[in-house]
Amino acid sequence: MRDFSYLRASSADEARQAALQAGSVLLAGGTTLLDLAKCGVMEPETVIDITHLSGLGGITVDAGGATIGALAKMGEVADHAGIRAAFPAVSESLSLAASAQLRNMATIGGNLLQRTRCSYFREPDVFPACHKRNPGSGCSALGGVTRNHAVLGTSDACIASYPGDLAVALVAFDAVVEVGGRTVSVDDFFLLPGNTPERETVLERGEMITAVTVPASAAAKNSTYLKVRDRQSYEFAAASAAVGLEFEADGKTVRDIRVALGGVATKPWRARNVEQALVGKVLSPETVEAASRLAMEGAVSHGANHYKIELAPRVVARAILKVGGLA
Amino acid sequence: MTIMEPRKHGDASDGTVGGRQTRFEGNLKVTGGATYALEYPLDGLAYAILVQSTIPAGRVVKVDAEKALAAPGVLMVLTPDDDMGLLVASDWGGNRPENQPYYPLPRQVQYNGQSIAAVVAESREQAVEAARLICITYEKAPHVAGFDDVAAGEGKVMDNLTSEWGDAETALAAAPVQIEGEYSTPREYHVAMEPHGLTVKWDGDRITVWEPSQWSHGMARSYSEWFGIPYENVRLVSPFIGGGFGSKGAALAHGAVAAFASRKLGRPVKLALTRPQNFTNYGGRAATRQRIKIGATEDGILQAIVHRGASETSTYADWPEQTGAATPILYRIENFSSQHRVVPVNTVTPGALRGPGKNPSAFGIESAMEELAYKLGMDPLELRLKNYADHDYQSGKPWSTRRLREALTEGAEAFGWSRRSHEPRSMRDGKTLIGWGIGCGTFPVIQAPSEAMIRILRNGRVEVVSGAIDMGQGTYTILAQTAAEVFGIPVDQVEVHLGDSRLPGAAIAGGSMLAGSILGAVHKAATAARDELIGLALNDEKSPLRDTGANTLTFSGGRIAAPRDQGPSLTLSELMAALGRDEIEILRNTLPDGATAQEQHQAWTSMAKIQGPTMGEYSMHSWCAHFAEVRVDEDFGTVRVSRIVSAFDCGRLYNPRLVESQWRGGIIMGIGQALLEEGLVDQRNGRTVNSNMGDYLVPTNADVPHIEVISVGIPDYGASALGGKGVGEVGIVGVAPAIANAVFHATGKRVRDLPITLEKLI
Ligand SMILES: Cc1cc2nc3c(=O)[nH]c(=O)nc-3n(C[C@H](O)[C@H](O)[C@H](O)COP(=O)(O)OP(=O)(O)OC[C@H]3O[C@@H](n4cnc5c(N)ncnc54)[C@H](O)[C@@H]3O)c2cc1C
Ligand code: SF4
């Protein structure tokens, strides 16, 4: 790891100012940053510690929704009674993520900004070609080991999947990222790779996430996060789904439904086509299965990740049936 | 290292052989008091790191280290241009080519990830950063990424592993029922918690190496031979090991590099392999494939087995992962044919990993047996019992003991096997398919000579001294129990010193052979020391026991007395004081009487004196039967093991608590092997791309179900002096097929290539 200087910011403004410098990065829980610094992927010159800043933590939940400070810990949010009651999918996405030790360290802001687990991205010495790391250098994953790569939202330049769980739940419920002065919906916050896979979010140099807000909804209250993987714990999703559902008064016709997918796409993936296919319909295993298949519209496999195209709709269907009381 | 404070729970009998004494060193380990090889604080330490090749085959043409040498803190860069003046050391058999130079950083690149340079600096971070400034020019050569690569070819037959009797092909062709399947296992790795590495220091031409080791004497010999110094000048210290699983039995290139750097710099050097380097600097279990054909009668009597196996090896050494190791001995079989090939590919030479050979072999034969059972429409348990081997058909010898029948029947009883429904997909819980499967396992009893010293001290304590290793399996504890029993004293009156090549010689902690070997030596030395004490007590004029008229003495409850209570009873310390002795020291070994010093040295530092399982009158093995229950999500293909019952015949258990832990540990590794573990190789450059613990998955606690283990063994005094058979490795053997068989029972899908990941079931 390269030597870097360490700055303990005394205020959010100072942190932002310092982060304007090229080579400067913010340090929250450090579980992504230090990991990538050790792999030689991130080479910060200055690390700006924001962990002690006040006003960036805290979780509040009221009738309108939840506000989660950027420095709130994954574990805290997962266990928060208000979050669990109003946004079960958010809580579950966190408690099924990483390990207890990581959840105690890692923050919500850092969590959104975690980087892909593409093995090629993480090994610069052996695989110099990676557009995401080094624009224009190529993509080592294409033609390589692609079991965990994305099938949705890929481009010729990059097929890396977005690995996080929380953002999948957030995108389903129209959460908003607060970035100092401006707010951006989670859906817009993350960018498709296109020809610029090095640009993963709309965050500009010197910007800091201060909070995430999630509007309350009946669908969010009746929601779940289903994560499927080979190992029972401590593994990224092979495919996951965040789903919320609100019935009409008849208790069977869909008034509002939210569906988002994880582990299969280059960004947290809202499946609006699945939602549209089900709104106004009476929920049944058949309608759900047919609609869930729409989630894979436009999916492309790259060899070993082919199974995701089969798996993901099944995960979506199970999650919908679960919140619909049918599974 | 001295371990003095045993944690004892339970009754007094826990402290004797066969008792459930808790681990002597457990307290030290969980409180952080145990110092591991990379934690020795030495003054003036320099830090070495390795630079690995990024191509799979070719030559290093040039290493440009100018920038690295100019980087802050850098002390030295070693490259293929440096002739370290080392000589090749002996192989495991003790054979050594004469005066052949040894290059731990070779110019020839044989695999991606091979060490080709090293950087030494004042701090590890400085070394790592400088390493990135090194510019290497290669001349590339074509490579073979794995044995499925067309360029790999068929490889070569290992003649010494061919086994034939009867007329297998003819009997197979004539058999009314036949099955055939190809089974494969991927590259698997040890993933010990403690990485490889060492701290090393020279004093003149004497060297001390703190390095995790499964074999202090064997590894010390390598250092002495590399550097051309007398064996006595090497001290290898390894009191604690954070897991070895077969990977820490031999000194490796990085050890030579660190030792050379230390000598050249005149400073102690520490070198720790990174986690990824723990996947490439020494070999894991080779990838294997095997084709098995079985012929049987309509009522399930085996007629013939034809087995053809292959495993990957490197381009510079032959390491066979013997797929036919368990195949010939599990069942009664009159016509048998087995052949194994090794296929050279551009990989580090594979190595021993818990249950080498037997493990993939059992995956093949135990999967095939269940395929046969289903073809016959027969209960797989019944098929196994029907073909029970009354003796070893391969060697023709009788078993020393073989309680595999009891393992199968008692395991089945505890598991509730009789409640099984035969048809696949016939047991479910909503979307969850449930399946049950059996897998048998075996591991040979290997015997090796060992040596031990017993010291009776004036304060009444007894010391057991041996260079043997405790890597978590319980050597400290069972040696203390053995001595405690001989002297009739509580275990906490015993001190055990282990893990130092300067202490008496011992077998490797590998091949499940250490306990059987070292216990024999400790028992012999302790008995001799007791006899010496008895002799003194009955004859020395200062002894209060001299006038009792007894011709022997009893040792029990911490006291020494004449057998029929005539005269006084004394504690050890009272007797030593009365005799005016400071200590009684006895060294004994289990070599034949009259072994020369040279023979003794050879016995502790090579495998030359090892006795295989059929070298005597009997065929000697440990046995087990695993019963697994899996739950498979019908839609997602995810497999969870929900229950395991395993019954073992490992002869007499010296400490059931520790044995059970070893069995469970093996079973847990088997779960990983069955469901998760696989080295993924990029075919384009032969690199293992998941060489880290985030991507190479081993089971977490959440993946481990309740595991019930049962002992059905009886003492086997042919197998070892105290009646035990090996326990360390047999536990993993047979787990993967039990799970694969359960997955078939649950889903109707037969997965013949490990691991059984979800995409294979959807
Ligand atoms: C072994 C392992 C397994 C994991 N498994 C999972 C999993 O299953 N599911 C899952 O979702 N995640 C998983 N993770 C990822 C983990 O959740 C993230 O590493 C963690 O959430 C990052 O948070 P942090 O606070 O440590 O971020 P840091 O490492 O401190 O920061 C990450 C990045 O975000 C930037 N940053 C941090 N805070 C802010 C802010 N307020 N404003 C702007 N920029 C900021 C930093 O500069 C840095 O670039 C895993 C991680 C590891 C190491
Ligand atoms: S998939 Fe994306 S991150 Fe991975 S190597 Fe290709 S460009 Fe880099």
Image: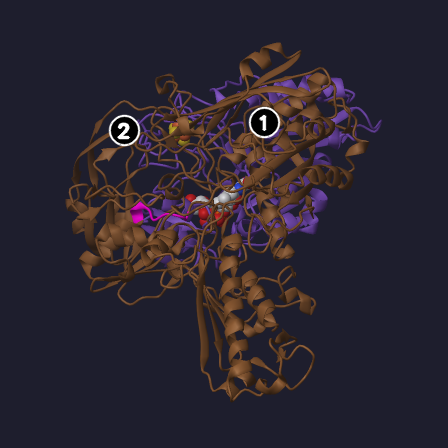
The answer to whether the beta carbon of the residue marked 1 is less than 8 Å from any atom of ligand 1 is no
Q: Secondary structure at mark 2?
A: loop
Q: Is residue B526 visible?
A: yes
Depicted B559 relative to depicted A267: above or below: below
Decide: few, some or many residues near mark 1? Use Cα within 10 Å; few <14, some 14-19, many ≥20: many
Chain that the image shows in purple: A
Q: Which residues are magenta?
A: B248-254
Residue B232 % position (x, y): 29, 61
Type of amino acid under label 2: Ala
Which chain does tag 1 point to?
B
Q: Secondary structure at mark 1?
A: helix
Q: Which mark is residue B57?
A: 2
Q: What secondary structure is the magenta-colored segment mainly?
A: loop
Which chain does tag 2 point to?
B
Type of amino acid under label 1: Ile
Residue at 50% across / 71% down in the picture?
B529
Where is the C terminus of chain B found, in terms of image quarters?
top right
Q: Is residue A303 left or right of residue B398?
A: left
- In this rendered view, identify the residue nearer to me: B75 or B36: B36
Q: Is residue B635 visible?
A: no
- In this rendered view, identify the residue nearer to me: B676 or A170: B676
Figure quadrant of residue B736: top right
The residue under label 1 is: B365
Q: Residue furthest right?
A: A250
Q: Which mark is residue B51?
A: none
Figure quadrant of residue B103: top left
Residue B513 colored in magenta in the image: no
* Colour applied to chain B: brown
Residue B253 colored in magenta in the image: yes
Residue at 21% across / 58% down in the picture?
B263
